[in-house]
Image: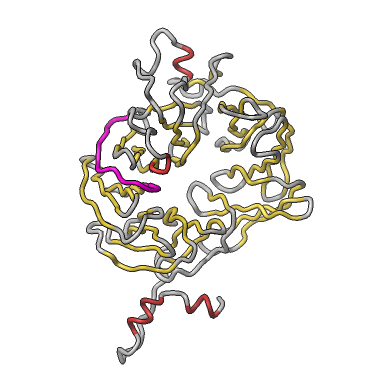
Amino acid sequence: MKRRELLGLGGAVLMASCGSGSKPKKVEPGELLAVSVGDGMTVVESGTGRRVVTPAATLATADGRRLVSAVAEPGASRVVTRDARTGDVVAQTTVRGAGRLAAVAPDAGLVALVDGDPAGRLETTIVVAGPAGERHRLKLPGFVQPEAFSSTGTSLFVLDMLPPEHPDSYRVRVLDLAAGQLTALNLPNAEAGVKVLVPEGAEEQMRGEGRQAVFDARRQRLFTLYSHQPDHVHVRDLLHPETGARDGRPDVHAFVHTLSVADGWAVCVDLPSSFGTGPVEGLTIAQRGDEVWVADAGKGVLAVISADVLAVTQELRFTPAAGRARLAVSGSAAYLAAGRQVQVFDTGSKSPRATWALPGDARGVAVSDTGLYVGQAEAVHRLHPETGAPVATVAVPGLTAVEHVLG
């Protein structure tokens, strides 16, 4: 570590120890936090602010234990996988072309890179690589954007952008990596192992944007929060136009797209009509156990979704807060950081518990069994998770968001 970095760490702790006549207390490294800064994602020690990983444009695995980046080289891309806890390189390989990192498997064993104009294109090149190098190179017609790998790693779920030159909508499809063919998703089926493709003409076309996603490793499901225009129509509406699935509610503006990466089906969970009608920065999602929590901070609404039933089970209201919002859920509480406050909700009763003031606008929030971390300009504040009392502050230059605590 460079001297100037050492001088910038734990300044408040060092100053408090000067002139006391006793030996300065050793500063413990604390828990590891994944945070975003101006240069990309990095990992810092919560007790010192020391960077464990050099910041880079990075995708993290679902469990946060691996960080994958693509480094541009002349005529090639070098894919580097690091251990998030140590910063050590655990795998790297080089593939031809100037591909952009687009998706990473949960274990970081596979990565997908995409080449083509991100604003619109008539052809897409997708490269799938593993630790030993390139495995698949596919040239596909249209604007195809990798989203997630299947559980087996044999398929890639993609967004098929329409129309490809100037897209204003898209549909989720499956790319068979061995065959190089795109097909529709499966229909959800109560019979385990039975897979039926969505019929032709009933594939869902979305007009919104994905705002944030969380992955449920136990259920092998990706929950993505979308906000969309009112004319969006779900697959089940197209299949059953006589009854529909929205109960006469064309005013739905946001939903949670649930993708089973194990069985290849998707279900959209409509959110109450207030969601998605305010600034998009107020939309946020988090998942823990059997529940998915979604909030629209600007409108003061929060919904709880059953991760099994895939339906909204509870809705509650709170005082709206302006600014970028983020949710973090522990075993007993959900923490919504937005604007200059953290609002706390009881996960058992689904009721508001407390509101804690912040000195500045929140820049993300993360929680562990022992600590609550809230981002601020150039710093991370640690709060007591039960009382909100300040515990410590560490400097993190360039901080844009606290992402999560490494388990």
Would you place residue 338 above or below residue 197 in this image? below
Of 109 and 258, the residue lying toward us: 258
Of all residues, the one furthest to the bottom in this rendering is: 21
User: For the view shown, which residue lies furthest in the top direction?
Assistant: 242
Q: Tell me residue 360's x, y (percent).
A: 35, 59
Image quarter (top left, top right, bottom left or bottom right) of the C terminus: bottom left
Evaluate whether residue 285 shows in this view: no
Q: What range is drawn magenta here?
A: 312-327
Q: Is residue 58 left or right of residue 253?
A: right
Q: Is residue 158 left or right of residue 47?
A: right
Residue 246 image point, x, y percent: 37, 19
For this view, does 66 lie left or right of residue 144? Answer: left
- Residue 353 magenta: no
Examine the rendered structure and indicate whether residue 207 appears above or below residue 56: above
Q: How many marks?
A: 0
Q: Residue at x 67, y 29 (%)?
A: 165
Q: For this rendering, which residue is in front, 379 or 371? A: 379
